[in-house]
Image (cartoon, helix red, strand yellow):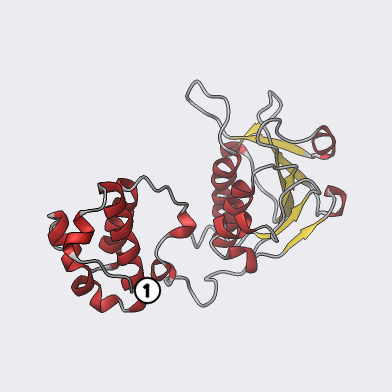
Amino acid sequence: MTTFSKRKFLSLTIVQQHKHAAALLKEAYQTNPPEVGEVYRRIEEWLNLPALNTETRHVADRYHWHLAQGGVRVKEANFLPALRTGDRAKPLQPPLSICVYLDQLRSAHNVGSILRTVESLQLGEVCFSGQTPFVDQKPVQDTSMGTHAWVPCRQGALSECPTPVIALETSPDAIPLSQFIFPSTFTLAVGNEEYGCSEATLRSADALIEIPLAGRKNSLNVANAFAIVAYEVRRQLQKDHL
């Protein structure tokens, strides 16, 4: 573990001090969490900080505070590893018989977020159109927080997915989510961040649904919109559990 004398540490710029403090805190936490306070105490004294509560949440807050002071931006996937040990050994519920079709999405981060939602709500499988970033891409894996390994994923065409096809789309013909009754088996299609579902997907869709919005903006981020619909699907099909 890299250490600094007080003189050397204080000779660094403020930005450098906080970057070093974040790195030290992370390394100490990964190596031996019970001793984090002892290792980190000198840094606290040199920066005139209150004593750190070494509970996991407080360590994470202090770690990210140092990063912010050091001008370092990180993704959620870069949280302290020990913060992610709360995953269950197995799901609480079996997966539903649903296919999620990703229709020409561009953002690997949106894809990873959708995978995380699919796994968390145990919806079923995910089918990727050819243009959508697949699970072999690291940004997808990082944003999915490891759930890419648990969700059945494949590349294919919408015609290979179960029917009926229900497309999430803002349209005068769309049915409000609150009024729609989901069948036990179907394909939910979500589209491109800019253009929505493709014309081919809309022609194949048996129904269109939308999330009624109250603000000036007419749409939501695709991963956020998907999460809202996904929860409603699970709520309807497993009323006893949510």
Q: Residues within 10 Å of mark 1 (few under 14, many from 20)?
A: few
Image position of 22 (left or right of 122) = left
Is residue 150 among what the camera can see? no
Secondary element at tag 1: helix
Residue shown at the point (57%, 52%) measured from the top left: 113
Question: Measuring 27% from the left and 57% from the top, which residue is drawn there?
Answer: 62
Between 144 and 230, the residue placed more toward the observer is: 144
Name the outermost residue toward the top.
216
Identified by mark 1, the residue type is Gln
> Horizontal and vertical percent for residue 120?
54, 61
* Residue at point 71%, 26% (across, down): 173
Residue 200's place in the image compared with 23, above or below, is above
Q: Give x and y (percent) for residue 93.
A: 56, 69
Residue 18 percent coordinates (x, y) = 28, 53
Is residue 212 placed above or below 59 in the rendered structure?
above
Quarter of the image with the N terminus in it: bottom left
Task: Name above or below for residue 153 compared with residue 15.
Answer: below
Residue 218 in sight = yes
Residue pointed to by mark 1: 30
- Along the line of sight, the residue nearer the viewer: 237 or 110: 110
**Residue 217 in the image: x percent, y percent?**
53, 24
Q: Is residue 178 left or right of residue 41?
A: right
Left-right relation of 142 to 194: left
Q: Give above or below for 215 relative to 118.
A: above
Q: How many marks?
A: 1
Toward the viewer: 84 or 97?
84
35 left or right of 189?
Answer: left
